[in-house]
Image (cartoon, helix red, strand yellow):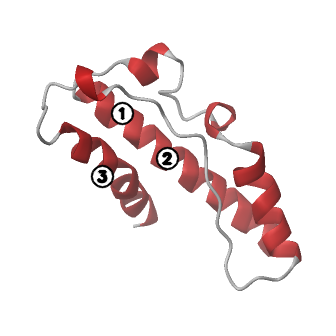
């Protein structure tokens, strides 16, 4: 049961992380993620079969002391951002900040 919980938390964390990148880009003037249908909390739009399911499952089965994975990156166009100097950094920071807020 603990293994299922670990995978669910990993998936939720990856979805929130990628959503926040898209959300920040959208707020800063780049609608690329929204136009591609990726500005959503729907896990099916973000999950990568290998990085979100297969690799974490193999790591759990092999009893590794840690489990990690990833999701498909949310696309954005830095040329659309209104803040040309710091916009890319804000979009990059939004994902980890979303995870920190979610973990609190």
Residue 48 - label: none
Image-based side of 48 in relation to 85, left or right: right
Residue 14, x across and y down, in percent = 56, 51
Residue 16, x across and y down, in percent = 49, 47
Q: Residue at x 30, y 36 (%)?
A: 24
Where 65 falls versus 71 (above or below)?
below
Q: Is residue 22 visible?
A: yes
Q: Residue at x 14, y 25 (%)?
A: 82
Question: Disc 3, disc 2: CB below 8 Å?
Answer: no
Mark positioned earlier in the residue sequence (1 or 2): 2
Whole-number angstrom distance, CA of label 1 to CA of label 3: 12 Å
**Which residue is the site of mark 3?**
93
Q: Is residue 1 visible?
A: no
Circle 2 residues within 10 Å: few <14, some 14–19, many ≥20: many
Q: Quadrant of residue 88?
A: top left
* SS under mark 2: helix
Image-based side of 27 in relation to 71, left or right: left
Q: Quadrant of residue 29?
A: top left
Where 72 falls versus 59 (above or below)?
above
Circle 3 residues within 10 Å: few <14, some 14–19, many ≥20: some
Whole-number angstrom distance, CA of label 3 to CA of label 2: 13 Å
Image-based side of 71 in relation to 27, left or right: right
**Which residue is the site of mark 2?**
16
Q: Residue at x 88, y 74 (%)?
A: 61
Q: Which one is in front, 54 or 9?
A: 54
Mark positioned earlier in the residue sequence (3 or 2): 2
Residue 23 - label: 1
Residue 87, x across and y down, in percent = 19, 37
């Amino acid at each position: 049961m603990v293994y299922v919980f670990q995978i669910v938390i990993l998936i939720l964390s990856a979805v929130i992380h990628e959503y926040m990148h898209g959300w920040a880009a959208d707020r800063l003037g780049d609608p690329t993620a929204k136009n591609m249908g990726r500005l959503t909390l729907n896990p099916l739009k973000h999950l990568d079969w290998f990085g979100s399911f297969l690799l974490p499952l193999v790591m759990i089965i092999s009893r590794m002391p840690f489990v990690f994975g990833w999701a498909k990156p949310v696309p954005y166009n830095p040329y659309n951002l209104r803040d040309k100097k710091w916009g890319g950094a804000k979009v990059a920071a939004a994902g980890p900040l979303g995870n920190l807020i979610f973990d609190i």
